[in-house]
Amino acid sequence: MTHLDTAISACRAAGQLLRDHFGTDLSIDAAEHHDVKLALDRESQDLITDIILKAFPDHAIYGEEGIAGNQDSPLEWIVDPIDGTVNFLYGIPHFCISIALRENGEIILGTIYDPMVNELWTIEKGGKPLLNGREINASPRTKLEESIIFVGCGKTEDALATGIKRFERASLKARKMRMMGSAALGMAYIASGRLDAYIESRISLWDIAAGKLLVEAAGGKVDLTPLPGTEDAWSIVASNGKIPLHEIL
């Protein structure tokens, strides 16, 4: 089984798990003001981990719910088992599984799967970005007033304040604004031409690893700015690479 086949298999298996539990009573591991952790987050990552390590026992797993495998391996799978957990908990069918593979620090593969509408995005380094096997491209739009922009507000007080200010500025210039609750799906939508930009002041690696490779392969642009004192967390500006965003940042 290839790396891509394994990632697809893991995404679909986790997707089935999430579909089976969508709309049911869920066990909450931890609840914060702006975030929740479900037992299902761990179950989904454990399922993904089992599938990947069965195929590649010497590889590393680096996920939102912890690490596994050989952490000295140059091949590391980056896993978000439910991107959009709050949406999932509240019965909003907008969430996904995101799996990426990096080799010696470079992302070489990405998959994003929305199990509720059965949409699977795939990308391999040097290959074509695909949605359910069909090639996709970022939108050709060049005017901010014709664009749809997704602004994330994060979970910290500073990130919320920054996001709200950006949302206000952008709402006066863009055609429509969105706060969607899943960074990975937001980037998949940019790669598919559905959205034109996604902006957030604090995001983690597992949220955007697969999406970055996908957006860039689809002709878009992703700028990541490391956050001081943090590991694998950035502010992000992802877009179709054509609309002017300097007016709203």
Image: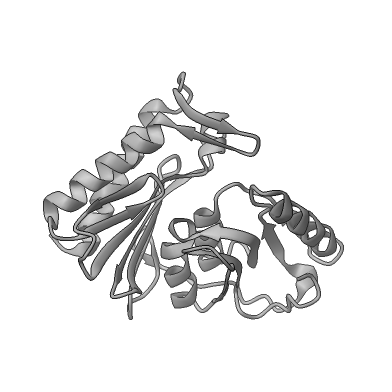
The residue at 59%/68% (across/down) is: 228
The residue at 12%/55% (across/down) is: 57
Q: Is residue 13 visible?
A: no
Split into 4 quadrants, where in the image is the N terminus? bottom left
Indicate the colouring scheme.
one colour
Name above or below for residue 226 compared with residue 71: below
Taking depth in this image into account, of 73 and 116 the one nearest to the observer is 73
Q: Quadrant of residue 5?
A: bottom left
Q: Which residue lies most toward the right here?
A: 172
Decide if residue 100 is on the left or right side of residue 151: left
Split into 4 quadrants, where in the image is the C terminus? bottom right
Q: Position of residue 191 (x, y in %)?
A: 51, 67
Q: Which residue lies most toward the front here?
A: 229
Q: Position of residue 116 (x, y in %)?
A: 44, 39
Name above or below for residue 40 compared with residue 155: above
Q: Position of residue 100 (x, y in %)?
A: 34, 62
Q: Quadrant of residue 62?
A: bottom left
The residue at 64%/47% (across/down) is: 155
Q: Which residue lies most toward the top here?
A: 25
Taking depth in this image into account, of 217 and 234 the one nearest to the observer is 234
Taking depth in this image into account, of 203 and 16 the one nearest to the observer is 203
Q: Is residue 145 visible?
A: yes
Decide if residue 178 is on the left or right side of residue 104: right
Q: How many marks?
A: 0
Q: Position of residue 18 (x, y in %)?
A: 38, 34
Taking depth in this image into account, of 177 and 42 the one nearest to the observer is 42
The residue at 20%/66% (across/down) is: 73
